[in-house]
Image (cartoon, rainbow, N blue to C red):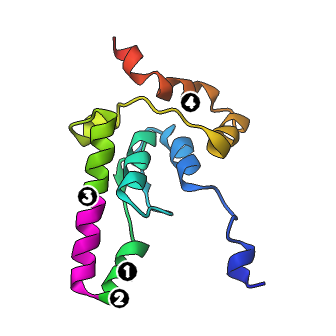
Amino acid sequence: MSIGLLYRDWGIPTPIAVVEASTARLPLISTGGVRSGLDIARALTLGASVVGMAFPFLKAASESYESVCELLETTIAQLKVAMQLSGAATIAQLREVDVVVTGETRNWLTMRGFEEDLKAMAQRRWRRM
């Protein structure tokens, strides 16, 4: 087995790292594992200030300029759809939508003591009323 495959699941997954790091209330850049406009939307709603996306663009750049342009247009369209489905007209509004974290991400964050943070994220709109 290659070293890369052996350690593929090593470390803290990006969504969990974003939630945990956002408690510092400092600007936060989310970059690991971002592959789509939906991933960008997720990172922003979980607390990222800025989101970077490298691998898909490097792969597209190795193919052609047109591939990069197509990927950029697709990524922007995916982000816009996520925003529309969330009722957010702006990135600032996207950061304020209710977020319900489920599955292994929720289990991990619960085990690390983030129950109140999860509840607060799920009730953002209620708290503003």
The picture places residue 101, in percent across and down from the top left corner, at: 56, 36
Q: Is residue 60 left or right of residue 89?
A: right
The picture places residue 15, in percent across and down from the top left corner, at: 53, 49
Give the dominant element type of the magenta stretch: helix, strand or loop.
helix
Q: Which residues are magenta?
A: 64-76
Q: Is residue 65 left or right of residue 103?
A: left
Q: Farthest residue toward the top?
A: 129
The picture places residue 31, in percent across and down from the top left corner, at: 44, 61
Quickly name the residue at label 3.
76
| Pointer 3 with pointer 4, Cβ within 8 A | no
| Pointer 2 with pointer 1, Cβ within 8 A | yes
Q: Is residue 37 above or below residue 89?
A: below
Q: Residue at x 37, y 20 (%)?
A: 125
Is 61 covered by the magenta stretch?
no
Q: Quadrant of residue 93?
A: top left
Amino acid type, mark 1: Leu
| Pointer 1 with pointer 3, Cβ within 8 A | no
Helix, strand or loop for disc 3: helix
